């Protein structure tokens, strides 16, 4: 083996990793926020729509779930600008991709959540004279969100890890920072040890925090 | 445009074969390693249980891309030289193994304790209990999520393109580099991945329905 660990160069360039971590979190937060909107709209639409709309939404969900994320990232960043006349930065492109990606997973989460809302609650809403819109807003969605909270936090944490794919289009997030240090200092083992620790600590800290939130909003039974 | 893509088809097919080969290796190797480690996690002594738990939670806590780079760039640094193809297979296998460990733990954990106790009471050895009592029942719980997880191996294999291995993803990028037909080729690639993975997820759903008669 004969490899001596030397972390000095890692600490000297730690700003690359720290900035990268913050950017990874930012990408994940923005993408899940947009993904939640996509997921909610499509899930509500799905449960009330006819066959044609359902087929289209299902096609979107299945397509995204069965294609590698890296291909979707390439497709949006390198492919799309060749057919539509818009210019966007790598970061915008990645956020758009990850939003569409998380949206597809969240449609499924929200759809099953909507179906899990007890029938009696909706009937009760009807009985006290709520309009369909009010029933959706005050009965169905709040209950559904409580039910789906654990799945939502899991999706967020896996999105945080998925932001590493942004490095393939040179978005300077954490994995990109790791590669930069890898190629410029050759302290390879050290940098990946540090980055592994950073992903793990952040991921488990997020998990812990989100579990606290879940406990606070746990569906009353 | 179309003629250029048709001209590239044999090349893309070779890439696709590499994708399938990587996926197959990863799926088979991780199945063996994952089942062994999963049994260790459920039945092993405390130190072994801890080791598997730490392995699984660490691997599942980091992005697969970081794991691939770690193995690919890190192993030569400590004096282990693996061909990039095998470094990629090793990294993907480590990742998938952690998943298989969890599928196995879930499946075995779902078998009521009484089954194990009854098997012990009639004098079966540990191996016999696993082979004749636990595994046949746990298999039906293990199979659907495992097949569904094979799609993750196929999707994950696209990342080996970053190590310069000419899988389907890399073949597509190379053809685009020559023809500049980015959109049609990415869509073609997406459809190929979709066809493979969608078939797998349909199979998984079928099996789940097939086994849905099992009551808790």
Image (cartoon, coloured by chain):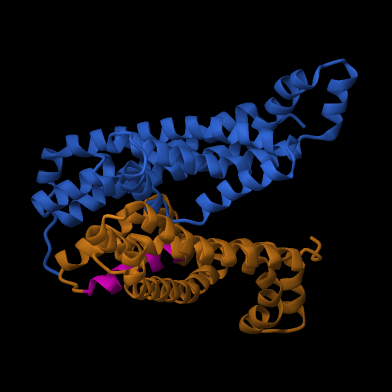
Residue at horizontal 51 percent and vertical 35 percent from the top: A35
Percent of width and height locating residue A57: 62, 43
Q: Colour of chain A?
A: blue
Residue at horizontal 11 percent and vertical 59 percent from the top: A4
How many dots with numbers?
0
Percent of width and height locating residue B64: 37, 56
**Residue A94 vs residue B141: left or right?**
left
Q: Quadrant of the N terminus of chain A?
A: bottom left
Q: Quadrant of the C terminus of chain A?
A: top right
Q: In the image, which residues are magenta?
A: B82-96
**Residue B177 vs residue A40: left or right?**
left
Q: Which corner quadrant of the image does residue B203 belong to?
A: bottom right
As for residue B83 lying within the magenta part, the answer is yes
Percent of width and height locating residue A54: 68, 44
Q: Nearer the viewer, residue A115 or A218?
A: A115
**Residue B166 vs residue B51: left or right?**
left
Above/below status of A132 relative to B77: above
As for residue A115 lying within the magenta part, the answer is no
Residue at horizontal 55 percent and vertical 35 percent from the top: A211
Q: Which corner quadrant of the image does residue A109 belong to?
A: top right
Residue at horizontal 84 percent and vertical 34 percent from the top: A119
What main secondary structure does the magenta stretch of the protein show? helix
Q: Colour of chain B?
A: orange
Q: Is residue B47 visible?
A: no
Q: Nearer the viewer, residue B30 or B195?
A: B195
Q: Nearer the viewer, residue B113 or B163?
A: B163
Q: Nearer the viewer, residue B7 or A13?
A: B7
């Amino acid at each position: 083996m004969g490899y001596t660990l030397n972390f000095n160069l890692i600490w000297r360039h730690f700003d690359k990793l720290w900035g990268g971590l913050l950017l990874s979190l930012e990408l994940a937060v923005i993408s899940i926020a947009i993904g939640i909107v996509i997921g909610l709209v499509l899930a509500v639409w799905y449960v009330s729509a006819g066959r044609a709309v359902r087929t289209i939404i299902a096609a979107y969900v299945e397509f995204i779930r069965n294609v590698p994320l890296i291909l979707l990232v390439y497709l949006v960043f390198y492919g799309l600008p060749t057919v539509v006349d818009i210019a966007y930065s790598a970061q915008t492109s990645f956020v758009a991709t990850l939003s569409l990606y998380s949206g597809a997973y969240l449609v499924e989460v929200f759809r099953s959540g909507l179906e899990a809302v007890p029938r009696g609650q909706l009937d009760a809403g009807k009985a006290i004279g709520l309009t369909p819109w009010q029933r959706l807003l005050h009965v169905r969605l709040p209950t559904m969100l409580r039910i789906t909270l654990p799945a939502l936090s899991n999706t967020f944490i896996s999105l945080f890890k998925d932001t590493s794919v942004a490095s393939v289009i040179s978005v300077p997030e954490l994995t990109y920072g790791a590669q930069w240090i890898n190629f410029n200092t050759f302290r390879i083992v050290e940098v990946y040890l540090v980055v592994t620790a950073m992903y793990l600590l952040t991921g488990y800290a997020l998990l812990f925090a989100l579990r606290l939130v879940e406990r606070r909003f746990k569906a009353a039974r | 445009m179309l003629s250029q893509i048709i001209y590239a088809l044999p090349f893309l097919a070779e890439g696709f074969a590499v994708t399938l080969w990587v996926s197959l290796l990863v799926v088979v190797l991780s199945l063996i390693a994952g089942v062994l480690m999963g049994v260790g996690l459920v039945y092993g002594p405390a130190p072994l249980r801890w080791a598997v738990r730490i392995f699984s939670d660490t691997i599942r806590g980091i992005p697969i891309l970081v794991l691939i780079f770690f193995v690919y760039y890190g192993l030569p640094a400590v004096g282990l030289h693996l061909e990039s193809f095998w470094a990629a297979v090793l990294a993907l296998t480590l990742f998938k193994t952690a998943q298989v460990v969890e599928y196995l733990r879930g499946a075995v954990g779902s078998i009521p304790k009484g089954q194990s106790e009854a098997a012990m009471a009639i004098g079966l050895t540990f191996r016999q209990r696993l082979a004749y009592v636990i595994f046949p029942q746990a298999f039906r719980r293990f199979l659907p999520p495992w097949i569904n997880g094979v799609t993750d191996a196929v999707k994950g294999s696209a990342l080996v393109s970053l190590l310069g291995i000419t899988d389907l993803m890399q073949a597509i990028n190379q053809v685009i580099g020559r023809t500049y037909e980015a959109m049609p080729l990415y869509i073609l690639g997406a459809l190929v991945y979709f066809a493979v993975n969608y078939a797998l997820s349909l199979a998984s759903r079928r099996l789940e329905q097939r086994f849905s008669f099992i009551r808790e």
